Image: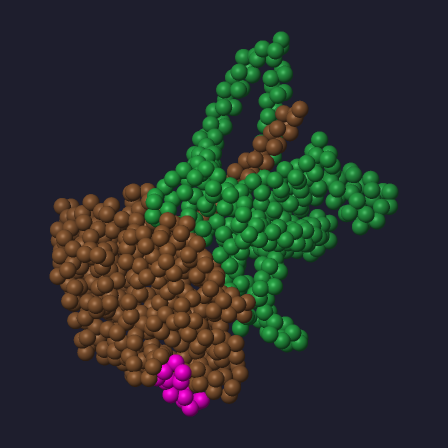
Amino acid sequence: MSSSTEVIAPARRETAARRAPGGRRSAYARRRGRSGLAFVTPFMIVFMLFMIVPLIYAIYQSLYTTKLIGGTTFSGFANYSTVLRSGPFWGGVIRVIIFGGIQIPVMLAIAFFFATIFDLGVAKWGRIFRAIYFVPFAVPIVVSSLMWGFLFDPAYGPFNRFMNAIGFHNFNWLSTNLMVPAIIIIAIWEWTGYNSIILYTALKSVPRDVVEAAILDDTPLWKIILRIKLPLVRPAIILLVFINTIGAMQLFIEPTILNNYQAGVVTNTWTPVIDIYSTAISNGEYQLGAAMAVVLAVVIIAISVASLVFRNRRREFT
Amino acid sequence: MLSTRRITRLATTGLAGAAAITLLAACSGSGSSSTPGGGASPAAGASSATHAAVLAGGNCSSSATRLTFWAWVPGMSRAVTQFNATHPSVCVTLEDPGAGTGEYVPLNNALKAGTGAPDVAEVEFDLLPSYEIQHYLVNLVPYGANNYKSDFASWAWSQVSQGGAVYAMPSDFGPMGFYYDQATLAKYHITPPATWAQLAQDAAKLHSEDPRAYLIDFPANDPQWLMDMMAQAGAWPFRYSGGASLTINWTGPAQEKFASFWQPLINSHTVALITDLTAGELTDMDNGSIAAAIYSAWAPSYFAPDVKRSMGQWRASALPQWSAGASVGADWGGSTYPVFSESKHPAQAAQFSEWLTATGQSWNIVKTPPSSLFPTYLPTLQSSAFKALAYPISGGSQPNQVFSAGALSIPQTPWPPFMTQVLNQGATTFGGVMTGKETLAQAFAAFQQQEVSYAKSQGFNVST
């Protein structure tokens, strides 16, 4: 959410500055600047303390190595070299990219479908259903992972029993090959409601006259939805892709919890964040963990920049 | 040239990335759940309190010396209250930051930061060398610890000693045994096996009679359990006695023998491959799908709340032996109470730790539920009152008789000084045995390489 404010705010400042005659800022602009500063200062202090300072500290830490025998020494980019050469770390990165690559489009399609139904107002008790679909988002992820863990449980879970009953013997949703699909199902359940609410709000803001004009032209409903409404809510979709991608890259809780139901599938390098956690906390290699976090952040930034470039090429928001 | 807007947008993206790093930091900081594939000790169980709950202390005189004490044993507050009542000059406040990892993570952070650590905390036997090597512990010898040496099982005392120093007071432990549902065993006409060879035959017999049932499970992905089993087999893989030298040997003849005994049972699915102390294992045990487990004395108290069908049917018998007639025990888990060098009142802290672990006054409280600790303190361990304790899950039987029999014959297990890494990596490496991805021997070979590489990266002189 804050990203859109960040984009808009400087543009407004430019306008204010342009109002000053002869290139000099007017008293009004100066006053406005001062009060603006007063408004952003509390945010900036918290932002500096809890975002920028820890970030710089993490980067600083990542340049050192502490050994049980020998203590702490400056090691330059040795930790980064370890991360860049770590097969398991990049295996985890590829796994979460595959996870996000499937989960996000499927979830957005479902979310758009529900948002459209609510937007059309054809569903009875639409408001109640909207609330119901939103409920999974309100369930803490740890709780929903535990719940799904019992549903997927290899020995007693109803989902495996169902698969057995329809002829798939020894079916195991939490086996090595199906763990990612199982987590995709959980993530879709968790996040569809939230995404459909955002899409619903975006659909609501599509100008009525555009839709009415289309109706007067006898445009079929599916064309109105896919050719008029969908392109108009594209900024919201891109925002959701952006947010969900960052979320997918940080997959941690679901596999961690499911590990209690099925031994030997979720390894300590299964996702990058699990890898970072076990490196820093279990192995006591905090500085190596910091380097991994920085590398993961760079990967996330790279994916985000790529999406921005793509967005610019498509002339979104311009 | 980039337009202002584009710069802003790129900056925004950068900030999103920065947010990601901070989120990562937040994730790792608040991790209360066990690390995938372990890290959590068996005693860690299901508790995941992230915030310390203050459980006892407070009603002390204002002149009393104040101590902070961290522990997760349920019912420990009763002992603290008793200590405060009988020692008016000291005031102990008990906090429970959560079991196992739940405590170790904030403890490590506080010790690293040099402030905020408790005076005394519960630390499991296997974790103690990890704190010793970082010089976080107070030598308790100047505070009279050696006066209690003869009160403790000798293997337990040597676990808390290094050189001439004593770095903690030993408390409870988990002697292992064959823990079985007597009704299920009777159904298959099996009696508790005295040797592992007999156990293998019984397991095959039971599984062939009912392919959905197992005699025992083999939770290879619990490295603590696995290593304790290896200790009994004479295949302990580490040698360490402080300092920079360490021996790691997962691929010697003893280890290979251990692996080659279990591998056929794994291959033929004669043993169940399921993580210990999980809902799945406990359900299987309750409904008779798993007839027995190689458990420790404390494990039944984790199992009992899940028991519905088999209440009163569970019995303990001695741990099966590698050679008939032998009597080699094994210990799974157990805790010690060290004093931390950050403490401003080491004398009083040592006094509390000694009272808690080495007095009948304390043991009369902590041996009873909900604490149900199994003592390394001989006067309690060898008392007939303790051996006669009965539990609803075990009907009229007295499991402590059996568990205490092997308590003095436990092999030495010199833990490596980076045990959280061993538990974490072990859970992943041996997890592959559970899914059939690799054999036990292959996992041993892989683990050997992983541990040697980690130990070297930590600056140790490693011999194999």
Rendered residue at 30%/56% (across/down)? B129
Quadrant in which residue B344 is drawn: top left
* Residue B52 at x, y percent in the picture: 33, 52
Q: Is residue B351 visible?
A: no
* Residue B205 at x, y percent in the picture: 47, 87
Chain B hue?
Answer: brown
Reply above or below: A86 against A179.
Answer: above
Q: Would residue B160 be found to the left or right of residue A289 on screen? A: left
* Residue B459 at x, y percent in the picture: 37, 49
Quadrant in which residue B316 is drawn: bottom left
Quadrant location of the C terminus of chain B? bottom left
* Residue B142 at x, y percent in the picture: 14, 53
Quadrant location of the N terminus of chain B? top right
Rendered residue at 42%/66% (across/down)? B251
Q: Residue furthest right?
A: A217
Over which residues does the magenta segment extend? Answer: B185-198
Q: Residue furthest bottom?
A: B189
Rendered residue at 84%/49% (across/down)? A220
